[in-house]
Amino acid sequence: MSVTDTAEKIKSMEVRGAGRIARAAAEALRDHAASVRSSDVAAFRQEMERAAATLVATRPTAVSLPNAVHIVMAGLEHASTTEEAREGLIHRAARFIQSSQHAVEKISGFGARHIRDGDTILTHCNSEVALGCIIEAHRSGKKIEVFATEVRPRNQGLITIRTLNDAGIKTNFIVDSAVRSYIHDVDLVIVGADAVTVNGAVVNKIGTSQVAHTAAEARVSVLVAAETYKFAPQTIMGDLIRIEEREANEVLADEIARTLPNVTVRNPAFDVTPAEYIDLIVTEQGAIPPQMAYIIIREYLGWGIEEFHESIGIGANHDE
Ligand code: RUB
């Protein structure tokens, strides 16, 4: 698919969910690299950078998107011919897509081990990896039941209940505000993530922090399923994750809004759950307490103190 079409589909949420967004961006860069005709390597690089910027600008919160683009684009500046640049990029895109799919499988297996026979699990929004854990537990023969929220305003809960239904899992569908009414029937909360910050806070679909707060009050464990490329290196430098605020008409129809001139609709798509409400983050490298987020950023995203020192001009003292 072209970069423009992919960007449009990500913006309109036809392609949604942090992992799928990341893979769609990698695919678009791969296809674009294959189609750019220029034989001048500098022009090729410039065109790929333009395409990367278009993709990154589509949705501001899911860190998986800039991380995927960064991984696919890495090393482009070292290529001396267009062919070398093209081949390198196509190879990195293919490797990213494959390892992303592999990460989903691994996390599903790890996460399923935290689900016990007879457990009732609550999930919010529609997360490929969170559902992967639940479905894997069911596949392994555990008798489980799920509470899935509706997820206003875009109703991602409908996608979740279809998937659970098709997997043959007993599911209760509830409105978002019913979480506290049912939390004592729940043994474990499992959600996905759009971003994990250096202090272990998890950015996910709006309402996740209320779910986690309610779970903490009821002493129900909260497990976050997140690939390592959802961890946010820029938070080491103090950058905040930007929370996307979407169109008002996702919440209130324009014709009604027009009759209410004193009313402003606020529609943040995501919120931040602090580390203290999260018991474990399950990554493809294994489960970690949220407080260990820095280690993941440093070890698996190649970001850490050296880059921090370079960025503030102290100068790095390392060999690479
Ligand atoms: C989706 C959402 C998901 C995360 C993780 O929001 O918040 O929980 O992206 O999903 P939206 P996954 O519908 O606005 O994109 O585990 O599939 O990456």
Image: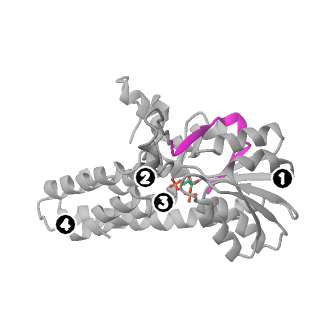
Q: Element under label 4?
A: loop
Amino acid type at image mark 1 = Asp
Marks 4, 3: nearer the viewer? 3
The colour scheme used here is one colour
Magenta range is 268-288
Using the rendered image of the protein, determine whether residue 109 is visible from the camera's viewpoint: yes
**Disc number placed over residue 36 in the picture, else none:** 4
Sooner in the amino-acid sequence: mark 1 or mark 2: 2
SS category of the residue bearing label 1:
loop
Q: CA distance from mark 2 to mark 4?
A: 22 Å
Mark 3 nearby-residue class (10 Å; few <14, some 14–19, many ≥20): some
Residue 187 is marked as 1
Residue visible at 29% across and 52% down in the picture: 54
Q: Quadrant of residue 245?
A: top left
- 316 vs 15: above or below: above
Does the beta carbon of the residue at mark 3 sit less than 8 Å from ligand 1?
yes
Query: Mark 1 packing: few (<14 Cα in 10 Å), some, or many (20+)?
Result: many
Task: Say whether residue 1 is magenta.
Answer: no
Find residue 159 and report its image quarter.
bottom right
Examine the rendered structure and indicate whether residue 97 appears above or below residue 284. Answer: below
Whether residue 314 sits left or right of residue 217 in the image: it is: left
Q: Closer to the N terminus: mark 4 or mark 1?
A: 4
